[in-house]
């Protein structure tokens, strides 16, 4: 069992303004192929409180829940030397309970924007990262990183996905 490593955790989150609390599980599993190569799998549920812009738009927004993601990660780590490491990582995550303006959830042309939000938004994101690190030795260090991601949100009116902010 020396080649396996299991890491587990829980994070408690409480947001007094909306009186919303939750527990977020985290789980990581690593397998050491040899002293220089490690394979990692991880899962985490991550909550984020509504933004202040979403909260102040309408008094009913005080009932908004925190949005959350379910994130899955797979990575390959290669230690070339004690000071040089390569990490290749891929991830997939889904977004739930994302606040969206109430007017964006209906096709009724007479529904006016009163600043109220509903936790009806969903989305997904996936991508990969290449990370090469040279740790500090003899006054020299460097990091080379490249990442690619695709983020999409689901339109609650049509159930079709579109490119999301920061895609």
Image (spheres, rainbow, N blue to C red):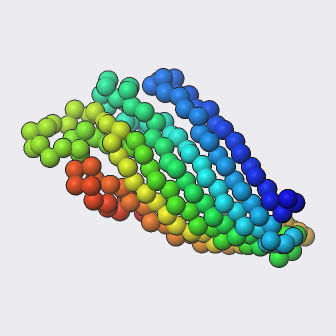
Q: Nearer the viewer, residue 136 or 94?
A: 94
Q: Residue at 31% x, 31% y: name it.
A: 57
Q: Is 62 displayed left or right of 114 in the figure?
A: right
| Residue at (53, 28) in percent of width and height | 21
Q: Is residue 14 above or below residue 105?
A: above
Which residue is located at x 66 percent, y 60 percent? Answer: 41
Q: Quadrant of residue 108?
A: top left
Does residue 24 lie above or below 88 as drawn? above
Residue lying farthest to the bottom in this orientation: 80
Examine the rendering and report whether any part of residue 134 can be seen.
no
Q: Quadrant of residue 153?
A: bottom left
Instruction: Reply above or below: 113 against 159.
Output: above
Residue 161 spot, x, y in % from top left: 32, 60
Relative to the observer, which residue lies in front, 22 or 129?
Answer: 22
- Residue situated furthest right in the rendering: 138
Q: How many marks?
A: 0
- Which residue corresponds to the image point at 38% horizontal and 49% vertical from the top-left? 122
Q: Position of residue 59 (x, y in %)?
A: 32, 23
Quadrant assignment, res 60: top left
Measured from the top left, where is residue 47 in percent x and y? Answer: 53, 40
> Looking at the picture, does residue 42 appear above or below residue 88?
above
Q: Residue furthest left?
A: 110
| x and y percentages locating residue 62 in the rendered image | 38, 25
Q: Quadrant of the C terminus?
A: bottom left
**Quarter of the image containing the N terminus?**
bottom right
């Amino acid at each position: 069992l020396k080649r396996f490593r299991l890491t587990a955790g829980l994070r408690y989150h409480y947001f007094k303004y909306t009186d919303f609390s939750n527990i977020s599980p985290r789980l990581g599993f690593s397998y050491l192929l040899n002293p220089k190569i490690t394979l990692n799998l991880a899962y985490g549920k991550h909550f984020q409180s509504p933004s202040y812009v979403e909260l102040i738009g309408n008094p009913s927004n005080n009932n908004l829940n925190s949005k959350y993601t379910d994130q899955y990660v797979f990575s390959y780590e290669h230690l070339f030397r004690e000071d040089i490491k390569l990490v290749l990582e891929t991830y997939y995550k889904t977004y739930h309970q994302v606040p969206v303006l109430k007017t964006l959830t209906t096709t009724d042309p007479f529904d006016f924007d009163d600043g109220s939000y509903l936790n009806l938004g969903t989305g997904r994101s996936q991508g990969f990262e290449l990370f090469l690190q040279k740790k500090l030795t003899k006054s020299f260090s460097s990091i080379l990183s490249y990442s690619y991601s695709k983020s999409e949100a689901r339109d609650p009116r049509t159930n079709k996905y579109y490119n999301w902010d920061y895609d």
